[in-house]
Structures are given as structure tokens and as C-alpha cells.
Amino acid sequence: MVTLGIGKSPRNSAVLPFYGAGTIFFLGLTILMFIAADSFKEHFFQPHTLALVHTAALGWGTMIIFGAAYQLMPVIFEEELYSSRLAFLSFWFLLIGAITLIASFWFFQVGFFMITGGCLILIAVILYNLNVFKTAVKSALNIQKIFLIVSAFWLFITVIIGVLLAINLYYPYIPSNHLEILKLHAHIGFAGWFLQLITGVSSKLVPMFLFGKSNNVKLLKVAFVFQNIGLLGFLIDDFFIGASDRVYIYYILVLMGILFWMAFLVDVYKKRLKKKVDIQMRHTFISMVSLLIALILIPVVLMVSGNQWSVLYGTFIFLGWISAIIFGKTFKTLPFIIWNMHYKDVHGRKNIPLPKDLYFEKLLFYQFWSFLAAFIILILGILLQQIIIIKFGLLIWIVVALLYVFNVAKVFFHKKTI
Amino acid sequence: MELQINDPFFQEKNKAMDGLYSVLDPELMVNIMDLGLVYDIDFASEGKIIITMTLTTPGCPMGDAISLGVKNVLNEDFPDREVDIDIVWDPQWTVEKVSAAGREQLGF
């Protein structure tokens, strides 16, 4: 049998633990948010807020994205994953590191636990980078691959700075303002890691899911240049010269990079053959709208005083943009992974279920609407600075998480029927 | 893929095609014949069936499952023949290869 070009999936151990842990982290995040509801009214540099942000960024976002990336690397690179074993190893480092770091922020234990947590995450990221580079070198470069490789590099830089900041909290040695460096750390994470990873993966997957092909790959190349020049300019200028109004130039450059990427997705959407847009793709739409609103909020955060703007910005990034894309993509990937595990060998026989039969589609529909309700109510609460509304929104977030956990668990614990 | 009435292996190919209509692309939920993924079924080599086919995209994560599905179906219908699958990328699969029935199922 000629197998060239057939997607050889990585071992399940390289993917499933990330999905499982990420799902639990998301439930944990919603519970912690409810407990620490007051954080949504305060300045972001608070122990509970730092714990929530790192639960969202590492336990939820990065955890699921690592699993999805290991699964999708063979699709994007058209090569087998370099090492499933390294991927599995990175899971343990990320898991233990994230738990340690989040706990150290929550109880604000600077020093050993915080630094150890950061170092464990750094090891996980180095292992991830190794897998990305070793898989990538086997095949020719294209723009999606470049996005994936560069995003891994930016993740590495984000975590390095994070560890240095953790050390600085215990043993202050950084001459600049801690919050300024924290700003760099956060924005390399957003615009380097999450943005470029999502840009690369979505520009490969969205055309596949919608049956739409854009020949305008130049848009992605321009997006790559703008996103990276904007980010690099911001980092170098802010670090070596200091905060200034030039930040708006870098903001516009990154914004242009995002708009070029979105123009590519719009082109794909217009040229799509599959007219019906499923619930998973609707999540992607909400995700993109959230990102755009977060971007609009940046000048507001910079110009208008009040904690609510930066909290709102973070909410749109983590709970809107990143969470919505994960909600949608989970049920575009996980059921297929589990289906492959159970039914690949008996495919073609009668009466075997399809991947879509492995989860409750109706529940995904309820999850979508409760997510919208939770998101809008929380935003209203933050805007109005009303703790009752914030708590009500956060309570619905727990419902969203429970629906999501239940559906993911249904896929995970599916019993083979043939 | 079209089957000619004067094909020396008409009956065998017809039976094979019937079987392959039951192999679905698990993601698209449309069978591989209507998707136009099967380019050729060759019975000319003794004791063998050579299937020349493609996938909707290189690196397709369901590729392994689809080719195993083809093998399973043909092994059941032709237990005395070995099934050989040749995955090709030229000609590349395009949506124009999807049959009218397939288009309807995909909601085009």
C-alpha cells in the first residue's frame, strides 16, 4: 500500500491527555472565577487575577492547543509527528508546572513554587518546540508552517520572560518597572503565541471545513509580516527605550496583520461550497468578533482610566477569542481522534457510528447559547461594575463549563459498539 | 469513475464499486465513490485488486481510516484477492469530482 501523504496520526497519548486536562482546567477556571468574582472589578495585578489569567492561558488555552497542535501537525506539515513520546512528556511538565504556578499565584507564594512552576512550563515549551522544529524540517515550508514555527518560538520567549518575572518578584533585579515587563510578557503571549498559532492553523483548517479555497495566500504572507514587525517593534522599543505613544504604530501594524488574516478567512468564506455553517464554525465567528472587540479596546485601555477596560480586554481575549475557538475546534477534532481509536480498523462494516455520533450535538447547541449569554452578562457586569451581574454571568460560565465537560466526557468514555 | 459495459472485469468492478459506496469519509459523511476519491479499480493482476485513489487533502487525518475501510470492504467481497491501495496526488482531488448525489449530501 502506498501511504505517502496519508495522515499518520500521532499516538493518542500525545493528544488525549491535553484535551482531558484542558477540559478540567476550564471547569476549574470557571469555578475560580466565581470564587474570585471581585477580581473583575480590580486592577489586574492581584494574586487571584494572576492565577485566573494563568489558568486561562496555560491550563485551558495552551493545554488544549498543545494537544490540537500535536494532532494537527501531520495535517499542516504533511509529515508524521517527530515524537509522540516527547509530546507525552511535555504534557506532564505543562500539567505539573501549570498547577504549581497557578497555586503559587492564587496563594501568592513568591519564590520556590512560583519559579519551579515557571521552569516546568519552560521545559514543556522546549519539548514542544523540539517537536515542532523536528517535524517541520522534514517538509517544504509554506505560510501555515511558518506561522506554526514562529508561534512556538514566541511561546518560548513568553515563558522565558515569565520565569524571569517570577524570579524578579522574589529577588528584584530587573531595573525596569515590573508591570512594564509584564505587559511585554502578556503581549508576546497574545500576539506571538496565540495569534500566530491560531492564524496558521485556521488558515489551513477553515478552508478544509468550509470547502472553500482562497488563492489569495499573499494575504497570509502580508499578515505574517505585519504581525511580526508590529510585535518586534513594540518589544524592542518598549524594552530599550520605554513606553511611549509609538505604541500606537505597533498596535496599527499588528492590527493590519490581523485584518489581512481575516480578509483571507472572509475570502474563503465567500468562496465556500458548503453553504450551511455548522455550530462549530459559528463558534469561530464569535471568536473572531471577540478578537476584533479586544483590539478596539486597546486604545481605550491606553487612554481611559479605570480598571474595567483592561479587565474587559482580558475577558474578550481569554473568554471570547481563545475559548470560543477552542469550543468549536474541540468537536471538530476530538470525536475524530476517538473514532479513529475505536473504529478505524473496522471502517467499512455496517452499523458503525460516525464521529458526530460520539457527542450530543444538541448539547453543543445549548452550550453555544449559554456561552453567549454568560459572555454578554459578564461583559455587562464589568462595564457597569456591578458585582451581582458579574456573579450571575460567572454562574452561567460554570453551566457552560459543565455542558462542555459532559460532552467531552461522552466522547472520551465512548464504548465501542461493534 | 465510470464503468464501461464492455470492460472485461465488468462484474467484478461493479461489485467492488457497490462495496466502496459503503465506505464513508467519516468527516464529510459522504461515501468515497460519490466524493470522487476512487480513480481506478484494477482486476487485471492475478489474485490482486489495485485501487488507485486520492484523498481530499494531503495529510488528511482520516486517510488511514478511509484506506482501511476500502481494504475491509474489498477483503470481504473478494476474499481470494489481495487488495493493494495506491494513493495518488496527481490528478489532485477537486470538488468538481464530487457527484450530484454527493453535492446534495454536502449541501453545496
Image (cartoon, rainbow, N blue to C red):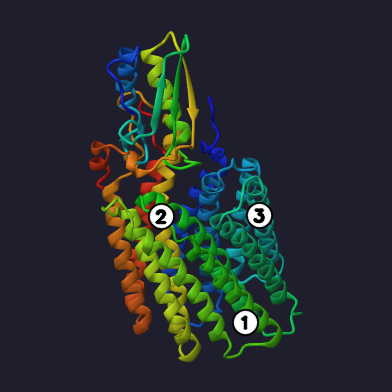
Q: Nearer the viewer, mark 1 or mark 2?
A: 2
In this rendering, position of residue A55 left or right of residue B78: right
Mark 1 and mark 3: Cα distance apart in space: 27 Å
Q: Which residue is mark 2?
A: A206
Identity, as a three-letter code, of the amino acid under mark 1 = Leu
A117 or A341: which is nearer to us?
A341
Which residue occupies 61% across, 44% down? A88
Question: Which residue bears the numbered disc 3?
Answer: A129
- Secondary structure, mark 2, is helix
Estimate the spatial distance between the alpha carbons at disc 3 and disc 2, rounded to whole Å: 24 Å
Residue appearing at x 40%, y 49% in the figure:
A208
Q: Which residue is mark 1?
A: A179
Chain at numbered mark 3? A
Relative to residue A339, is residue A169 drawn left or right?
right
- The spot of residue B53 in percent (x, y) is 43, 30
Which of labels 1 and 3 is toward the front?
3
- Residue B94 visible: yes
Please name whichever residue, A184 or A44, is drawn nearer the observer in this view of the structure.
Answer: A184
Give the mark count. Answer: 3
In the image, taking residue A272 as reference, residue A224 lies left or right, namely right
| Looking at the image, residue A320 lies above or below residue A300 | above
In this picture, residue A180 sits left or right of residue A381: right
Choose the circle earlier in sequence order: 3 or 2.
Answer: 3
